[in-house]
Amino acid sequence: QVQLRESGGGSVQPGGSLRLSCAASEYIYRRTYMGWFRQAPGKERERVAAIHTAGVSTLYADSVKGRFTISLDNAVNTVYLQMNSLKPEDTAMYYCAADSVSSRLWAGQASYWGQGTQVTVSS
């Protein structure tokens, strides 16, 4: 049973935009906190953004502040990551995650993870 399903990845030129989507099961969506992480080849997984599913608060990694926006659509249990002004260093596999505890999510120790969607930024 798929709990989190990411989509929207692809290839884009530097300066371009992509929007990632993460569709969650009702059970997972009610876990309260959802976020995006990424992992480039040969590098550790890093956090990107997180949000409370009530839309009350958001968190962003310094490397994406001002360029990426995390948002929700509660009607379809989906979290989005709008990525603008993409750079080659944004190239990575992007993962959606969910947990009931924000600190656990932000530490990369979330209870639920998706399979990932690849983002490639290259000219």
Image (spheres, rainbow, N blue to C red):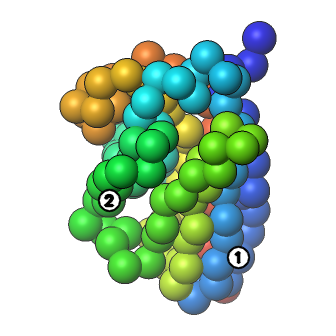
Q: Which residue is mark 1?
A: 12
In what quadrant of the picture does the C terminus appear?
bottom right
Q: Which residue is mark 2?
A: 60
Task: Please say if 27 is above or below 52.
Answer: above
User: Which picture quadrant has residue 6?
Assistant: top right
Q: Residue at position x 67%, y 23% from top?
A: 26
Give coordinates of residue 60: x percent, y percent.
32, 59
Q: Is residue 44 visible?
A: yes
Q: Is residue 6 visible?
A: no
Give the camera-side residue of 73 and 107. Answer: 73
Q: Residue at position x 58%, y 67% from top?
A: 82
Q: Amino acid at mark 2?
A: Tyr
Using the numbered discs, state the Cα–Cα distance from disc 2 to disc 1 in whole angstroms.
22 Å
User: Which picture quadrant has residue 77?
Assistant: top right
Task: Please say if 29 is above or below 20.
Answer: above
In this picture, residue 15 sits left or right of residue 18 = left
Disc nearest the viewer among 2 and 1: 2
- Give the tally of numbered discs: 2
Q: Amino acid at mark 1?
A: Val
